[in-house]
Amino acid sequence: MFKEAFDDSIPESEKQSSSKAPNPESNPPFLPHDKLQLEKIFFANNEETPHLPGDKKDKLTVSSFDREADIIEYRDDRPSHPWLSGGRAVLLGIGIGVGITLVGTRFLTSSGQKAATSPAAAPIANVQATAQSVTVAEVKTTSVNRTLKATGTVAAFEMIPVTSQATGLQIQQVLVDEGDFVQAGQLLVKLDDSVLQAQLIQAQAAVAEAEANLEKLRTGNRSEEIARAREQVRMAQAELVQAESDLELAKKRVDGIESLEAEGAIARDRLDEIINEERSKQSALNSAQAKLRESQQQLQELETGTRREEIAQAAAQLAQAKGQVKVVMAQLKDTRVIAPASGKIAERNARIGDITSNSEKLFTLIENGRLELRVKIPETQLPLIRTGQSVEITSDVDSRLKLVGRVREIVPVVNEESRQATVEVDLPSQNNLKPGMFLRASITTASATSLTVPMGAILPQADGNAIAYVVQEDKSVKAQPVKTGELLSGDRVEIVAGLQGSDRVVVKGAAYLKDGDRVSVVQ
């Protein structure tokens, strides 16, 4: 609609003249990328702005330039308003179309006159338009650390299994859990000790009895005990005399009864009865004799004292009783499972109510919570590794994990299949480190001074190489092939070859350049 209105407002003579081929000297063509320059010329040649609202003047841009129709479009991205509907919208559209037509006519007339009076202006404008605005950076000399990249697994420096020495006892209490840091000697588990406590009481009683017996043997016999033994001997002698007298009387009676029984004066049963009494008196005599011998022996022992072998035997019994006490006390001690060393609990298997066995682990302890990173290094790169080298450690899972370790040991064994050796790296104490984690390591093998540039100055190429645009003295750029080295902190990269210390390279805007382009350096 705007094109038709624009054509109707131009006289036929101007239409015919505009349909002719343009004269480059009087009206130079605008390059496609001279949109900004075209806008500047447009507003410079129109002192009077179109009849548009003040807040829309900034929206007036030349979106297309048709030499045949000389159409200038007006774009407004603002949302429509309810009152712009019906007849109001039609009137407003007609007004805007007429205003744009007048502005376009004046712009074409003014630019044509300006080009005729200043034939050198167009080439200058073209030169200025082709200069790409860029930012540059100087090549710097920086200390660069040579690094070796590798991966590894976190492992405990020393993993200690914690077991119970007592077997067959029930776990009563578990005092620690996984992740807890414990001190050497700290109580971890308590076992049921009720049976062992009863055994201890019995063993202690046996010790007391053995001690009393030994003390009695060592101190000797008292006089009253000897007197008592002598009295027992005297009484035994008296009993023996009585038994002998009774037996003598019984024998005489048997002799008399036998003669009577032969004469038929008494019955045979009476004779048998008297004979049995004699035999009873003989047994009593034998008992009295034995009792006398025993009493005499006791008296003799008391009068002569205790023998050494008896004291030695009593002492041995005492030592045995004490040994049993120690055994029970050791078993009681084993009912308290303690930490063998300071460290972190990595694994807990102990549960309340379980029955212990000395072959089953209750806990796994990382000594002093000390962890290490075990890195695999190819044997061809082992000569670059030395103990004490700094190692930067990162994680693919947690970007916040950034540690610095030290090479502690190079294991002097190379795997025959992988041709790799293990390098052990000491890790700082961290709560978020756990055995089995996968980490990346960057081992600093050497330091050197090299040229560096910002990362944005390097443009990778399809053939695998890279270039950087170097600013020349005439403000043109040269596509310079470069060879890069280490990536540094601060988004800088090492330049191994291709640049010099005095060069300036394009950082921002380099992706839009080609070799020989002119640039305008901005801060």
Image (cartoon, rainbow, N blue to C red):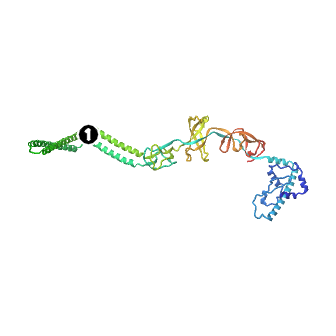
Toward the viewer: 136 or 253?
253
Work out whether residue 501 can be spotted. no
Is residue 218 toward the left or the right of residue 422 in the image? Answer: left
Residue that carries the numbered disc 1 in the rendered image: 306
Q: Is residue 389 above or below residue 355?
A: above
Which x, y percent locates residue 24?
A: 87, 48
Which x, y percent locates residue 358?
A: 45, 43
Toward the viewer: 39 or 351?
351
Badge 1 crowding class, 10 Å Cα cut-off, few under 14, some 14 to 19, many 20 or more, is some
Q: Is residue 57 above or below residue 354?
A: below
Residue 76 figure quarter: bottom right
- Amino acid type shown at disc 1: Thr
Work out whether residue 112 can be spotted. yes
Residue in the picture at 66% in, 38% down: 449
Q: Secondary structure at mark 1?
A: loop
Image quarter where the N terminus lies is bottom right
Residue in the picture at 40% in, 45% down: 331
Residue 473 figure quarter: top right
Which x, y percent locates residue 377?
A: 60, 37
